[in-house]
Amino acid sequence: MFNQPILIASNNLDKTIELAKCFKVANVHAQSYQNKLARTTFPKEGTTSYLDNARQKAIFIAEKMPHAYVLGDDSGMIVDAYPDKFGVETSRQLVDYPTDKDKNDYLINLVAGKSRNVTLRTDLVLCSPSHHLYHGFGEFKGTFSDQERGQNGYGFDKILIPQGETHTLAEMPDCKKAPYLHRTKAVHNLLKRAVQNEYEYF
Ligand SMILES: O=c1[nH]c(=O)c2ncn([C@@H]3O[C@H](COP(=O)(O)OP(=O)(O)OP(=O)(O)O)[C@@H](O)[C@H]3O)c2[nH]1
């Protein structure tokens, strides 16, 4: 479907690796935009819409690489016990917790004695060389564990238990974990819309 690699418009390396893996499963080659352009600072993200932020990141790089396929992503976390926290501003609200362990310990303490339900969501926007914009969306639904468990993963994987499971994502092999990930679902949704040629212009 794509005659050249998709460039991922993100400075978050873990996210870039995870997205590239999700595309690889669908036989699509995706890689960091930094393989083609020097690292750049993205415009400040908005506070209301994942989709607008993903579109902004994709268009920002597409304007510098107009003949490329460029993918923008925005993701975040919705914690049932704190409906007014996180969301589109997740990464900015966790900035005081530098390591994954710091973030996970903070979240475990935050939900202690409260609802442990959590949703993670991703919106993706792909800009094509013909200036079509394709949108993809995916959600992970599950609960926070009460301690870190497992080794296979990064970020929140050690404390996220998918709905209907007892193990954390980091306790699962990739083949079991992948279908639960919000980014896997968003990539599938995006590719479905690309196949069906559902796009807008930019
Ligand atoms: O461990 C995680 N596993 C996940 O599955 C996940 N999904 C969302 N998040 C959090 O949400 C922020 C994304 O924010 P975000 O999309 O704005 O990206 P970012 O600011 O890190 O990089 P960039 O793409 O903007 O350059 C991240 O930093 C994380 O805090 C996740 N963390």
Image (cartoon, rainbow, N blue to C red):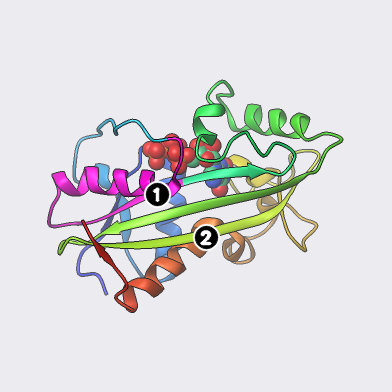
* Element class at badge 2: strand
Report whether 62 appears left or right of 97: left
Q: Please identify the quadrant where the N terminus is shown.
A: bottom left
Q: Which residue: 52% across, 24% down? A: 95
Looking at the image, the residue that sits furthest to the bottom is 196
Q: Position of residue 106 (x, y in %)?
A: 70, 28
Residue 43 seen anywhere in this rendered image of the structure: yes
In-image side of 20 versus 91 (left or right): left
Residue 121 % position (x, y): 54, 52
Choose top left, top right, bottom left or bottom right for residue 23. Answer: bottom left
Please name the residue that numbered disc 2 is placed on. Answer: 138
Residue 125 falls in image quadrant: bottom left
SS under mark 1: strand
Magenta residue span: 47-74
Dot 2 amino acid type? Gly
Residue 14 circle label: none
Q: Quadrant of the C terminus?
A: bottom left
Q: Looking at numbered disc 1 in the image, what kind of residue is underneath it?
A: Asp
Q: Please name the residue that numbered disc 1 is placed on.
A: 73
Tell me the residue at 28%/30% (across/down): 41
Image height check: is 98 above or below 82? above
